[in-house]
Amino acid sequence: MTAPAVEDLLDALARAGLKRTVPRRAILEVLATIGRGASLDEIHARMRAKTSTAPDASMVGFSTVYRTMRTLVRLGLAREIRLADGVARYEIGKDEPLRAHFHCRACGLVEELPAARLAAFLPSARRAAKGRVERVRVEASGLCARCLADLPPERRRK
């Protein structure tokens, strides 16, 4: 799924009765730039580094980032990802019933994995649960290509 444009998300916030504020624009721009799940700390740090085109983005406080992300999730404009490390990460887009992520245990990178093959798992999960399975989450963890390349050759195959 492609992420909606920042203007589309701001329009959706306005339709929900919320103002198009400079901090909201800046947060959405940072999320769109990152293009993957990002923690509140990472979003806030990027804003403080002025990676947004919105004026005064570097002055946005951590609590504003937190409240904005909670609002975006509540409205279905962003999703929260919580992996085994317990860190909440956020990305633009609606929650989907089938999700798969890779988490690098060395550098913390989180990337979405193609979930197409998970679709075949859903019917068997429903039968096993004898009820309604609404979401399936898969987390793969290990070392990303960059961290793996940093290892000595003898440790790369383990």
Image (cartoon, helix red, strand yellow):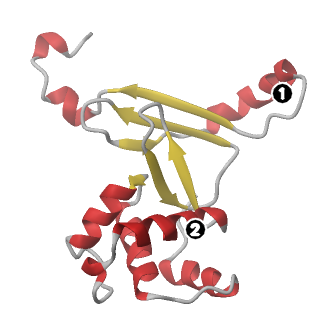
> In the rendered image, which residue does mark 1 sit on?
126
**Up-down: is 106 above or below 33?**
above
Q: Residue at x 89, y 29 (%)?
A: 131
Q: Residue at x 31, y 39 (%)?
A: 108
Q: Position of residue 128 (x, y in %)?
A: 83, 18
* Count of marks overlaid on the render: 2
89 and 94: which one is in front? 89
In terms of image quadrants, where is residue 134? top right
Local packing at callout 1 (Cα closer than 10 Å; few below 14, some 14-19, many 20+) is: few
Task: Give the side of residue 21 with respect to residue 11, left or right.
Answer: left
Q: Residue at x 41, y 68 (%)?
A: 63
126 and 48: which one is in front? 48
For residue 72, which numbered disc appears in the image? 2
**Up-down: is 130 above or below 102?**
above
**Up-down: is 129 above or below 122?**
above
Task: Report the residue that reaches farthest toward the front.
Answer: 63
Q: Amino acid at mark 1?
A: Arg
In terms of image quadrants, where is residue 27? bottom left
Q: Position of residue 3 (x, y in %)?
A: 52, 65
Q: Position of residue 50 (x, y in %)?
A: 22, 76
Q: Quadrant of the C terminus?
A: top left
37 and 41: which one is in front? 41
Q: Amino acid at mark 2?
A: Leu
The tag earlier along the polypeptide, 2 or 1, is 2
Alpha carbon separation for disc pair 2 and 1: 30 Å
Local packing at callout 2 (Cα closer than 10 Å; few below 14, some 14-19, many 20+) is: many
Task: Report the residue that reaches farthest toward the right.
Answer: 130
Q: Position of residue 48 (x, y in %)?
A: 23, 71
